[in-house]
Amino acid sequence: MIKRLSLLTLASMTAIPLFLGIGSVAGAVPQNVNLSGTGKHLSFSATSITVPIVTGANCTKTDYSFSITNKTSVTQQLELKEGSKFVKQGSPTTAGTLQPFCISSAETIVFSVKKDHHALLTVTAP
């Protein structure tokens, strides 16, 4: 179970605890995955990543950190897989936006995109 993913906002530059959060802050995150493609043919530049504990982009020294950049030309809605369905989380991601994430516990989560549930990204925080 996800204990916390943080929304990072440029205005406050603070982490707000959320189930899943997305923001628009370019920060010091160690690993980035790009989302690209068009229409219903989207893909992540890596389908699986293992993220380290890192301090940066307002993560604490015990958080796991990574980012997703929307390299498509349109706004995309990231979703989180919960059981056998995908659940919309947070605000849509505008084109060209880097969204940093902090995960507070060791776990594996799966992201997708509302327009293409075949585009999957598995994130493991060991």
Image: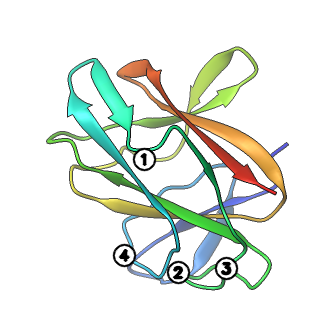
Disc 2 residue type (three-letter): Ala
Dot 4 or dot 3: first in sequence order is 4
Which residue reaches farthest left? Answer: 73
Across and down, in percent, residue 50 comes to: 66, 55
For label 4, count other residues whose C-alpha is less than 10 Å away and answer few (under 14), some (14-19) or many (20+). some
Across and down, in percent, residue 7 comes to: 55, 64
The kind of secondary structure element at disc 3 is: loop
The quadrant of the rendering that contains the C terminus is bottom right
Relative horizontal placement of residue 12, taking residue 106 as reference (left or right): left
Dot 1 or dot 3: first in sequence order is 3
Across and down, in percent, residue 104 comes to: 78, 65
For label 3, count other residues whose C-alpha is less than 10 Å away and answer few (under 14), some (14-19) or many (20+). some
Q: Residue 45 carries which label?
A: none
For label 1, count other residues whose C-alpha is less than 10 Å away and answer few (under 14), some (14-19) or many (20+). some
The kind of secondary structure element at disc 1 is: loop
Relative horizontal placement of residue 105, taking residue 118 as reference (left or right): right
**Eyeballing the image, is 56 above or below 75?**
below
Dot 1 or dot 4: first in sequence order is 4
Residue position marked by numbered label 4 in the rendering: 26
Query: Which of the 4 image quadrants contains residue 18?
Result: bottom right
Label 4 – label 3 distance at C-alpha: 15 Å
Dot 1 or dot 2: first in sequence order is 2
Q: Tell us which disc is closer to us: 1 or 3.
A: 3
Residue position marked by numbered label 1 in the rendering: 91
The kind of secondary structure element at disc 4 is: loop
Label 4 – label 2 distance at C-alpha: 8 Å
**Eyeballing the image, is 116 above or below 65?**
above
**Eyeballing the image, is 82 above or below 78?**
above
Across and down, in percent, residue 89 comes to: 55, 40
Q: Residue 57 carries which label?
A: 2
